[in-house]
Each structure stands twice: as structure tokens, then as C-alpha cells.
Image (tube, rainbow, N blue to C red):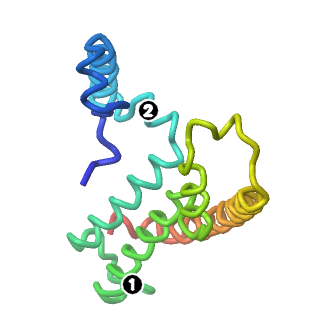
Amino acid sequence: MKNELSVWRWGACTSYYIKRPWKWFKELWYNIKDAHNRITKGYCAADWMEFDRWFKQVASDMFRDMAMHSHGYPGSEPFDTPEKWSSWLHRMSDQLKKCIDEDEGNEYYQPFIDSLMKNPQTILTREETEEERELRKKYYDRFIEVQKEHKELFEKTMKEIVEHFDCLWG
């Protein structure tokens, strides 16, 4: 499984870099620069350019690790048992993770992508069929709904985290 938070990001496949080695060295330079910035500052340009995704990913992973290692169990209401604390940490992790993927919950995502990939060379130049136009409209309408649902879930999750923020250090 690829670590989405890795500094080592490669934008193309190996054969691309074999044919264009200067591109590989250019990306290597950016990767080294990002690694240096993460070491010295704790974040890099790639992190703040995608801060929303980065935060949700890191916080989700941290809550999951805290639950696995029973860290910070406060021993007070509403977390009077380690199981309740672990359950809450897992729930916060799951909710943050769900907010990351913009297309999770959009049942039109795969059919829409499939219709685009039928003939990818002519996506911009050919006329859309009525069926494709309708599918695109359904996809984007659902996309907006899913974004709104994810925003509401994120706000609800953050309110709950803030409410129990002091418990995280037990």
C-alpha cells in the first residue's frame, strides 16, 4: 500500500523517466527539498498546497494509532472505559477518512469515468450524446451533494474533537 503522505512523489511511470532522465532528476530535487522541509519545519510545500487532504489524512491516521496503542485514555465521562475511548478514536478516524475522497458516495462516479474513457482522445472534440450529457449532469449534481455531506460531516467531527480536545493528552 502506497503511503499518501510520503515525500517521495513521482508524477509519472518508470518508462517516462527512462526516456527523460532529466525529468527524474528534477523531481528528485523537489523530493529532496520537500524531505528537508519536513525535517526542518515539519511540513513541505506539497502539504500546504493540499492542506485539507493532508490534515484529514494525518489526523485520521493519528486517531487510529492512538486507539491501537490505548494512548491518552482519560478515564472520565463520557470515556469511562478504555473501550469507549477506543471506539470514539476509531469513529473520529473513520469520519475524517470518509471526508478525504471527494467521490466516495457518488454512485455516478464509475459510470461517468467509464463513459469518458470509452474514447479518451476525442473527449474535448466530439459531440456528447444525450445519454452522456445526462450522466455528466447526474454525476456533477451528486458531486455537489457529496461535497456538502462531507463538509457537514467534517464540521460535526471537528466540533466533537474540539469538545474532547483536552482528553487527547490524557
Between 155 and 151, the one lying in front of the other is 151
Expressed as whole percent of the image width and height from the top left, the position of residue 62 reads: 33, 59
Residue 163, located in which quarter of the rendered image?
A: bottom right
Foreground tag (2 vs 1): 2
Compared with 55, 169 (above or below) is below
Locate residue 83 relative to residue 137 in the image: left or right.
left
Residue 71, located in which quarter of the rendered image?
A: bottom left
Q: Name the amino acid type tagged 2.
A: Ala
| Residue at point 71%, 40% (across, down) | 126
| Residue at point 31%, 24% (across, down) | 16
Q: Which residue is mark 1?
A: 79
Locate residue 3 relative to residue 121 in the image: left or right.
left
Between 120 and 65, the one lying in front of the other is 120
Mark 2 to mark 1 CA distance (whole Å)? 36 Å
| Residue at point 62%, 66% (across, down) | 108
Q: Badge 2: few (under 14), some or many (20 or more) residues near its Cα, within 10 Å?
A: some
Expressed as whole percent of the image width and height from the top left, the position of residue 107 reads: 59, 70
Compared with 111, 31 (above or below) is above
Between 6 and 68, the one lying in front of the other is 6
Which of disc 1 and disc 2 is earlier in sequence? 2
Expressed as whole percent of the image width and height from the top left, the position of residue 35 reads: 28, 28
Expressed as whole percent of the image width and height from the top left, the position of residue 76 reads: 38, 84
Q: Badge 1: few (under 14), some or many (20 or more) residues near its Cα, within 10 Å?
A: some
Locate residue 12 relative to residue 49 in the image: left or right.
left
| Residue at point 49%, 66% (across, down) | 98
* Quadrant of the drawing holding the N terminus: bottom left
Q: Name the amino acid type tagged 1.
A: Phe
Q: Of the numbered discs in the image, which one, if any, rests on residue 46? A: 2
